[in-house]
Amino acid sequence: MLKILKLGGSIITDKSRLATARLDQISRIAHELSGIEDLIVVHGAGSFGHIHARNFGLPERFSGEGLLKTHLSVSELNRIVVEALHDAGVDALPVHPLSNVVLRDGRIHLMSTEVITEMLRRGMTPVLHGDVAMDVSRGAGIVSGDQIVSYLARALRAGMVAMGTDVDGIMIDGRVLSCITPERMHSIEPHLLPAKGVDVTGGMRGKLAELVRLAEIGIDSRIFNAGGSGNVRRALSGERLGTLITGREHGDGPQEA
């Protein structure tokens, strides 16, 4: 069963400080992923991408220099993550979306998945990340890790999607919702808090929108707190952590945070 894990930029970077990786968290998570097969890892750009993008006015203003500096910065974070995985015994390889994604109006229009499926077939773990990408309508844009997860889950029919964040799930009045269905989105959106630090990809609202699209075609996902020791491995093992986003009724009342 194919598993897709998203690691939020708030977990692996300090989003308030330019290009600052949280090396302890990255190392811990890498060790939790040791031995897990059929896995794709996607990570956010955090302070390696969002601050550069904001400074250059991306994606609203086309800037070749901004594209280059943003891409080089997020590629550096990707290198750190891939090397930590390798040190933990995971056969990881980088995949840079700038080179295999084309956008249209800010959404993924084309994405080559052949290299990803070949890596998986060979027992490797592809590691993708939030990045800049060319856009046939706007010149260029930002492709979020959340949008990449959504696209790959559809294209490769993932059996599990887990979104690691710095919160325990979708929270309302200090309590975690155990389950969200597409029908409940209109009542939940007003309660979603803005992202911490600089974020040009929509924060929790953007994340949840991508996952609701998956739920509508029958692919369930979970938003969980990847900051707790062991939580990443627990989530990928199928434990009921955080908030389930599903198109099916599961009893969607709150649970204690």
Image: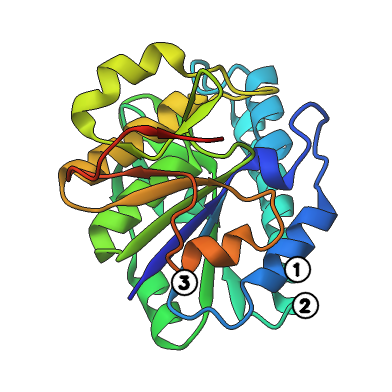
Q: Secondary structure at mark 3?
A: strand
Note whether 6 is above or below 31 in the view shown: above
**Residue at coordinates 75% horizontally, 69% vertically from top-left?**
83
Q: Residues within 10 Å of mark 2 (few under 14, many from 20)?
A: some
Q: Position of residue 23 (x, y in %)?
A: 83, 55
**Residue at coordinates 18% horizontally, 42% vertically from top-left?**
249
Which comes sooner in the sequence, label 3 or label 2?
3
Q: What is the distance, in whole Å, between disc 3 and disc 2 at their CAs?
A: 17 Å
**Residue at coordinates 43% horizontally, 61% vertically from top-left?**
4
Could you tell me if the residues under marks 2 and 1 are in contact, i.e. CB atoms within 8 Å?
Answer: yes
- Depth order, front residue of 149/1: 1
Question: Which residue is tagged 2?
Answer: 87
Q: Position of residue 102 (x, y in %)?
A: 36, 44
Question: Which residue is tagged 3?
Answer: 39
Q: Is residue 151 visible?
A: yes
Circle number at residue 84: 1
Note whether 1 is above or below 229 in the view shown: below
**Residue at coordinates 59% horizontally, 60% vertically from top-left?**
232
Q: Position of residue 207 (x, y in %)?
A: 43, 34
Disc 1 marks which amino acid?
Ala
Q: What is the distance, in whole Å, between disc 2 and disc 1 at their CAs?
A: 5 Å
Q: Secondary structure at mark 1?
A: helix
